[in-house]
Image: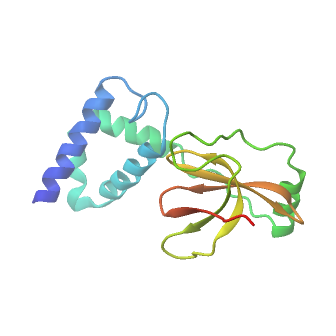
């Protein structure tokens, strides 16, 4: 019963946000917050015994319909050699910077590794860091210079000692 009360409160919060004319949960631009909430509500919609909990929330349902209408994109399979060729042919990297106050300096030699599984460290030079993302520059003999992006959640950054 407590979970049902929490869900009702969250649904009411999203309903109020959307009634105010927002296009997204955190403002006017969709973000990971929208997709994170939408996927949970998608499951509720598909579960007939509980789907009715969403019915009183017209604004929430319109927002959910808009988010779900985005779909899944189009997947295109390519061979690994083709992916490497695309990376090697890239002429620029997405802009990135190391934000101040996060404990690391731009240009530092670091490793990034998952904290739960697949914990092999990936070494490189720190070129981007925010609360949500870490970006390292590394060289690959086949693909050239790459910027590898990792989420902050579930990953750790360690400064490497230089000789």
Whether residue 57 can be seen here: no
Q: Quadrant of residue 27?
A: top left
Q: Residue 148: x and y, percent?
A: 70, 56
Q: Residue 112: x and y, percent?
A: 61, 64
Say which of 143 and 62 sits in front. 143
Whether residue 81 can be seen here: yes
Residue plotted at (52% across, 55% down): 152
Residue 75 sits above or below residue 29 on the image: below
Residue 103 sits above or below residue 31 on the image: below
With 44 as the anchor, is 4 left or right in this view? left
Identity of the residue furthest to the left in this view: 1
With 129 as the anchor, is 33 left or right in this view? left
Residue 1 sits above or below residue 127 on the image: below
Say which of 65 and 23 sits in front. 23
Residue plotted at (24% across, 37% down): 13
Identity of the residue furthest to the top in this view: 21
Residue plotted at (39% across, 42% down): 64
With 24 as the anchor, is 163 left or right in this view? right
Residue plotted at (67% across, 41% down): 96
Say which of 153 and 83 sits in front. 153
Q: Residue 16: x and y, percent?
A: 25, 31
């Amino acid at each position: 019963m407590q979970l049902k009360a929490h869900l009702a409160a969250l649904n009411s919060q999203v309903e109020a946000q959307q009634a105010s004319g927002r296009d997204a949960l955190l403002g006017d631009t969709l973000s990971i917050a929208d997709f994170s909430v939408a996927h949970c509500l998608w499951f509720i919609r598909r579960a007939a015994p509980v789907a009715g909990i969403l019915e009183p929330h017209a604004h929430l349902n319109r927002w959910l319909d808009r988010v779900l209408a985005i779909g899944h994109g189009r997947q295109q399979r390519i061979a690994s050699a083709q992916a490497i060729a695309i990376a090697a042919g890239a002429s620029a990297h997405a802009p990135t910077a190391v934000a101040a106050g996060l404990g690391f300096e731009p240009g530092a030699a670091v490793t990034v590794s998952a904290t739960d599984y697949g914990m092999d460290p990936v070494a490189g030079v720190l070129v981007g860091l925010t609360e949500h993302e870490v970006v390292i520059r590394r060289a690959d003999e086949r693909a050239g210079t790459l910027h590898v992006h990792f989420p902050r959640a579930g990953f750790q950054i360690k400064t490497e000692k230089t000789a």
